[in-house]
Amino acid sequence: MVKKTTSSARSSRDGSPLFTYEIYHDSDQKTRGVRATGDTEGATNLWAIDANGNATPALDTNYPVKVMYSAVNPAGDKVYLALDNGWFGSDGNDYQTFIARNNCALYEVTPADNTFKCAVEGVFLQNYDDDYYKRVSSNQKPIQFDKDGNVYFLGTSFTVQNDGGYCFGDNYDALTGDINEYNDQGQVIGCSAEAISAGFEFFENVWIDSASWNPTLYKYNPSTAKADAMTQDNEGVQYFSTLTSGDIVIQGWNDNTQKQTFAVLNTLGARINLLETDWGLEFFTTDSESTVIFSDWTDSAGLRMVKPISPGVHKTVLGLDKFAVNNAGSYQNPTPRRVILADDGKLYGVFESWSSYQDKNDKWVSNTTLTVYQVLPYDPVPKAQLNLGSNDWWSFMEGTPFQISRGFLFYRQKESNIAIGGVSLGSADTIVMVNLQTREKKVMLMPQTATDGRYEIFSWRLSGTELYFSALNNTVNKVVTGKIDTVKVRVDADESTYLTVNETASAIGATAKIQDIAVLKATRPENDPGGSPKAEFFANSENPNSVTIEFTKYMNNQSVLDNLTFKNTTDNEVIAYLPLWINKTLHLIPDSDGLTNSTGAGMENNKTYQVSLGTGINDYYSTPIDQTTLSKTLSTAPDKGWYIGDTDATTAALSDKKVAKFVGRDNPNTWGHQYYKIADNLPAHFELKFSAKNLNYSLGTVAVHESTASYRWDGLILENFIDSWSSWLDYKDASDNGQWDSYNSDGKVVPYASGNWANYRFRFVGNTYQFAVSTDGSEYTEIHKLTNVKTPTAAELYLAVNEKLYIDNMQLTTLKSDGTVNTSAGDLIDEKFESTLPTASPNLNAKSSDLIAN
């Protein structure tokens, strides 16, 4: 069905309005066909929805028709429908007859007048199920298009079979003899002359049959109405993706070798195999141009990337070891389970993790988590974390698990028990929106009263700032379509303001649900918005694996690549790189070993690199690039320990000029933290303050130990562990008993370890311990306050780190027994890290090897 829009912000290249195309199934409703006699004869799940949300059947047929999915061509003037033959999950209805009688399972619809015709005869298309969605990590369906409008699809050929038929009519009372004509084998081959005169019609018993179940990749040219097979019949193609270059990426199974296949079919007609081992493929997707991103089942900590370059390919690995976390009690897979290419040019990775901890009843609790990171441009601070409990990540990925648009993450979350007014109303699906900058969450579609909608969401898609969904509203037992204005959600508008819902059908049967929503997203504008394009560079000394260039306009991509140089200026060497385009953003994946292998060498440590743009670069509209910023120089960090570097803080009260930067432990694959001594012989009352910015999951641990102990656990007084979602304390109480405490944020955004600069204050005054955080350098939020902590005597102070960290403005101050400053702030330590690493207190050049927790 077609829902027209008139928004000028969403129009096709010819200026015509774009639309959403929504499919649902209702096998118990008849269409407009006047000859339907049974409950399912003439039923269809193809409905047309007008601008007011009114739904009417879009097909006039005497046989049940079920559409599996739809796809809209790039011009927005054709919709292709894949019909279900009933083999991918029977619901008791006969969907083969319509296909067999018309010898067609792929139709072309013109939304302008709602006319349709058969596109390709004798082929049924592959199913679009959860496995397909989870494997192809980009919302691409089994119907795709190239830049010339050719249609690609996975299909299996069939033949139409028959064994006679039957006569059908209304006026049986007018007949005196047999209504059928028979052949020598006794099969009904027609209606008798009397039956024909009475208005009876003959219907053949027809069905479809297939000689092979292996899906083949086809290319259909709408201009010539010709379809050609592109793969062999001994290979069942399971998934594919069409590149803008005209090359095709396929994944399948070879019947002869009994192994998975993954290959590029290039424009020269050649095939280039991409899998380097016998391990299978986990997922793949493509960028805006022609680079393929995929992950196979190997131990490689990274994303594999391939770009077709005639007559072969360039390939590399984007190293993601910077995102891997191996802490005591937790583990994170260094390769994401999925990636998301966002509309703002960023690439996000969804990493599987598990963690375990001991609760206050001394019971160990284990959880599966999915953590979202911004992989490109590099930002190792987690953006969101989903606790799946004992559920597995594969099941969570069913349906539409994640979508990102304009800096916000959206995902579906099931609330298992909605209790209102003292009664349980069952479960309901909600949509959660996460601000990826602040990590603030907002939950949409959560019922507040017994009459509010309780939705079982079938499908949902995000288009810019509008979110479309289809669902069963269990409150009224109706199938609905809905639209959420997410801009209004951001400003805390009421549901009545941001939500629009239209009923489409009664939920009579289990199959009465909208299976697919296809949203045509806006492409780059055909008319020049004006101005010269500008470039902004993003690079990080601790990240040797990528450099990002963000342009203000859509570019002539080839002119950028033709005039771009990437050099190691320390050794005067040109560096090879693989380009990854996401809309207006170019990500460069350097590989010092070249692009003929998959080592993913990246940039070397302690070297200087420069990325330069030449003057021959134009935007998509042929406007030359602005000359203001055309290069970026980057000095890469050492591979471990501390070094002095420039601050990136915007608040001088938190940090200015130079800072101390920790880039990694000696043994990054071991468990635990690396301890650095800040001071010893601590006074009974003291305050430690420093500004810090975490560049990964954890900020680190502030530890106070008795100096007389030979091992850190023996002499532990207090350790305060801080990560992006929790602050945890292990400590001894005044009676020398082991205790612990954790901070409960009550679902609020925590002010610490957020990936932004903050000031951290730790105070010991007698038996009282306090931990507070300030995001502006003046106003503090208290995180912990304990009043029964063992008083430190002859104690040592440590900073324990295990991940990337920046620190500045460290002060250690002696306090009086009332908590006021004894003489002056920073009387024990006042370090600003302006030139070299200090070699006294704190000594960041020498770690305490006996305190490394492996």
Image (tube, rainbow, N blue to C red):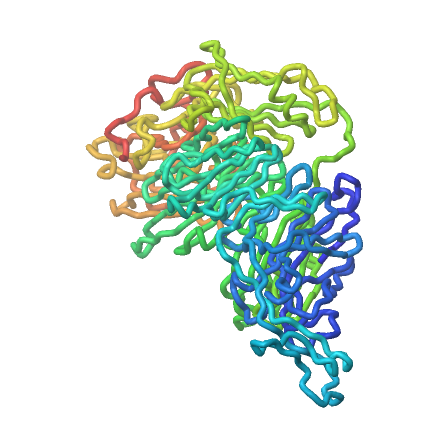
Quadrant for the N terminus in the image = bottom right
346 vs 838, nearest the viewer: 346
Is 431 or 750 nearer to us in this picture? 431
Q: Nearer the viewer, residue 154 or 111?
A: 154
Residue 371 position in % (x across, y down): 46, 44
- Image point 47% across, 54% down: which residue? 396
Question: Horizontal placement of 256 versus 451: left or right?
Answer: left
The residue drawn where x is 37% and y is 17% is 838
Q: Is residue 610 above or below residue 815?
A: above
Is 355 placed left or right of 382 in the picture? left
Image position of 582 (left or right of 765): right
Q: Is residue 220 visible?
A: yes
Name the quarter where the C terminus is drawn: top left
Q: Which residue is most to the left?
A: 710
Please determine whether, in this image, residue 840 is positioned above or below residue 690: above
Using the image as rendered, state which of residue 504 and residue 328 is in the foreground: 504
Q: Position of residue 384 (x, y in %)?
A: 50, 44
| Residue occupying the far front of the picture | 184
Residue 534: name its quadrant.
top right
Image spot of residue 761 (x, y percent): 44, 34
Would residue 760 be visible to someone looking at this image? no
Q: Position of residue 6 (x, y in %)?
A: 79, 48
The mark total stands at: 0
At 58% across and 76% down in the image, what residue appears? Answer: 184
